[in-house]
């Protein structure tokens, strides 16, 4: 492995009731890099995010953050070490206000951050006193992101944040993710919107049936026969 | 609020002669509040909450009888005994929902059967219970229960307003998101579990001190759990005032009609529970919150 790798996965595997949903997954990435994670439905993208963030325990392999093995650590400990995420289906604390959602992460996430600035960054400053449950789904996704940012992550896992956004909103989110990467935060972005991914990533990983099928640029991926076959079911 | 509550129960014996009733009301306020700490702030509903109450009563009494400990110190010992039982039962927190509640109920009954076992009569008094009449001091026990009730309520206030309480609210809303906020859920739950058990243990200790002669059923009876749950739910869990209002109102009602005409009492209680579940699942104080009045 490169000594500069922020995160490195080696031989990571996960089974559910005997069915392998992630197999022998391995890759590494650097601070400030944006990596796209793509693949057909059921290819293991969200499971990979769950394994890295600690929501699921790995069955095989190792995950290192700045050289430190973390695959056996509880999710909250990984948060303290600098890994956080957003969710495909947003999971805010619905009865809490928007500001409280971010405050709780800032309080327990072990970082001193300007929660007001974070809400500004994600475009929720005007909603700070509203209950999170009253937000639209898209705004709840941004709140998930804000809550993750409140823990000062080194690695941010972003799970299908673009779904349901209009082109203007997508452009804003892309700008935000690029700005986060410029701050040195590494991002793994799970996304089906390839145009969106093309704008923010230099490198993508394509998963199929839980295995890494391809690693390279999005343009190379779209010209790769196995990738095309995987997406088209060929 | 604590000052008002404390002064009220200090003054009431001077205007109302039945101090025993006031003592028992404080016992149930403390128990409802202790249960509220666990259920209202973590979502775990302990059907066997009485087990900690009984553990405290027996712990206190055994320390008085076998270690010659002063009663007040033994009350503390009873709280610690209940917390020790909670440590042993800590793995129950791996369960959730009805599974936790039923398992907790079962463990409280196991505890009851152990202390009531005739083979243990030399130590626990077996089915004949214990007598600690030599330390009988109803005034001191009254003040002790008052302090326990206030401590339980002070902890509930802490849970409502503190950073720790904010974390508990987050945990109750969404476990995974709470972990992603950096909260050590296992540790937080365990702390609340121990604190809640200790409150029940302290209440059981002071109760044993007050009555001084009791059978196992008097401190392990399931009705104690049921009362604590209903009282807390009636007022509103997750609040500070809810369990106080619930326990005070329903225990007063219990005394007004439950002792003289128990058949009506059961009927009214059953009706109340149905109304509560159907129309006020968050307790009577939620009526105020619906009108925009924030309840502590």
Image (tube, rainbow, N blue to C red):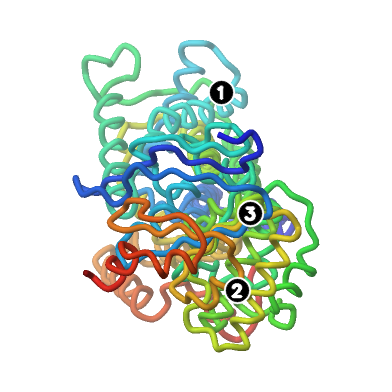
What whole-number distance in Å separates the C-alpha atoms at marks 1 and 2? 70 Å
Q: Is residue B207 visible?
A: no
Q: Secondary structure at mark 2?
A: helix
Q: Residue at x 61, y 84 (%)?
A: A169
Q: Nearer the viewer, residue B244 or A29?
A: A29
Q: Nearer the viewer, residue B49 or B172?
A: B172
- Compared across the picture, whether B126 is left or right of A163 comes to left
Above or below B259: residue B280 = below
- Compared across the picture, whether B250 is left or right of A171 comes to left
Q: Nearer the viewer, residue B149 or A186?
A: A186
Of badges 3 and 2, the one in the foreground is 2
Rendered image: mark on residue A186: 3
Of badges 3 and 1, the one in the foreground is 3
Residue that carries the numbered disc 1 in the rendered image: B74
Q: Residue at x 53, y 32 (%)?
A: A69
* 3 and 1 marks in contact (CB < 8 Å): no
Disc 3 or 2, which lies upstream in sequence?
A: 3
Residue B138, located in which quarter of the rendered image?
top right
Q: The disc numbered 2 marks a residue on which chain?
A: A
Q: The disc numbered 1 marks a residue on which chain?
A: B
What whole-number distance in Å separates the C-alpha atoms at marks 3 and 2? 16 Å
Q: Is residue A114 visible?
A: yes
Residue that carries the numbered disc 2 in the rendered image: A199
The answer to whether tags 3 and 2 share a subunit is yes
Residue B206 position within the rendered picture, expressed as x and y whole percent measured from the top left:
53, 35
Of badges 1 and 2, the one in the foreground is 2
Q: Secondary structure at mark 1?
A: helix
Above or below B267: residue B199 = above
Above or below A165: residue B272 = above
Count neighbours of disc 2 (C-alpha within 10 A) and say few if under 14, some if 14 to 19, many if 20 or more: few
Residue B123, located in which quarter of the rendered image?
top left
């Amino acid at each position: 492995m490169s000594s500069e790798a922020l995160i490195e996965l080696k031989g990571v595997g996960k089974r559910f009731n005997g069915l392998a949903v992630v197999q022998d997954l391995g890759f590494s990435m650097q601070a400030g890099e944006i990596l796209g994670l793509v693949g057909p439905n059921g290819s293991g993208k969200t499971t990979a995010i769950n394994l890295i963030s600690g929501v699921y325990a790995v069955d095989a392999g190792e995950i290192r953050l700045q050289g430190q093995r973390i695959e056996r650590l509880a999710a909250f400990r990984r948060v303290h070490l600098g890994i956080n995420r957003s969710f495909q289906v947003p999971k805010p604390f619905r009865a809490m206000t928007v500001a409280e959602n971010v405050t709780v992460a800032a309080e327990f996430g072990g970082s001193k951050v300007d929660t007001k600035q974070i809400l500004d960054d994600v475009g929720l400053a005007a909603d700070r006193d509203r209950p999170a449950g009253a937000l639209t789904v898209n705004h709840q996704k941004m709140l998930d992101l804000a809550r993750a940012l409140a823990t000062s992550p080194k690695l941010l896992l972003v799970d299908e944040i673009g779904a349901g956004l209009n082109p203007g909103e997508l452009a804003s989110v892309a700008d935000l993710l690029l700005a986060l990467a410029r701050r040195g935060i590494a991002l793994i972005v799970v996304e089906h919107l390839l145009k969106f991914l093309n704008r923010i990533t230099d490198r993508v990983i394509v998963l199929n049936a839980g295995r890494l099928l391809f690693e390279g640029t999005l343009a190379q991926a779209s010209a790769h026969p196995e990738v095309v076959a995987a997406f088209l079911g060929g | 609020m604590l000052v008002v509550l404390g002064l009220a129960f200090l003054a009431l014996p001077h205007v109302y002669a039945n101090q025993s009733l006031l003592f028992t009301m404080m016992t149930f306020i403390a128990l409802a509040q202790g249960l509220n700490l666990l259920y209202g702030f973590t979502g775990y509903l302990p059907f066997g909450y009485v087990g900690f109450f009984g553990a405290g009563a027996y712990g206190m009494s055994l320390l008085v009888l076998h270690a010659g400990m002063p009663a007040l110190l033994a009350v503390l010992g009873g709280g610690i005994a209940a917390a020790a039982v909670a440590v042993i039962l800590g793995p129950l927190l791996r369960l959730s929902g009805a599974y936790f509640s039923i398992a907790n109920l079962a463990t409280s009954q196991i505890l009851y059967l152990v202390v009531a076992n005739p083979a243990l009569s030399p130590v626990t008094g077996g089915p004949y219970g214990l007598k600690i009449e030599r330390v009988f001091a109803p005034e001191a026990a009254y003040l002790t229960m008052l302090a326990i009730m206030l401590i339980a309520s002070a902890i509930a206030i802490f849970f409502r307003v503190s950073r720790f309480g904010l974390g508990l609210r987050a945990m109750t809303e969404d476990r995974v998101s709470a972990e992603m906020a950096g909260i050590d859920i296992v540790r937080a739950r365990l702390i609340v579990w121990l604190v809640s058990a200790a409150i029940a243990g302290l209440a059981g200790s002071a109760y044993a001190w007050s009555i001084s002669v009791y059978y196992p059923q008097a401190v392990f009876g399931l009705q104690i759990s049921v009362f604590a749950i209903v009282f807390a739910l009636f007022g509103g869990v997750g609040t500070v005032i809810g369990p106080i209002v619930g326990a005070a109102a329903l225990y007063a009602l219990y005394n007004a009609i439950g002792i003289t005409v128990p058949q009506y009492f059961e009927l009214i209680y059953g009706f109340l529970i149905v109304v509560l579940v159907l129309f006020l699942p968050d307790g009577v104080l939620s009526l105020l919150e619906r009108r925009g009045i924030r309840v502590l």
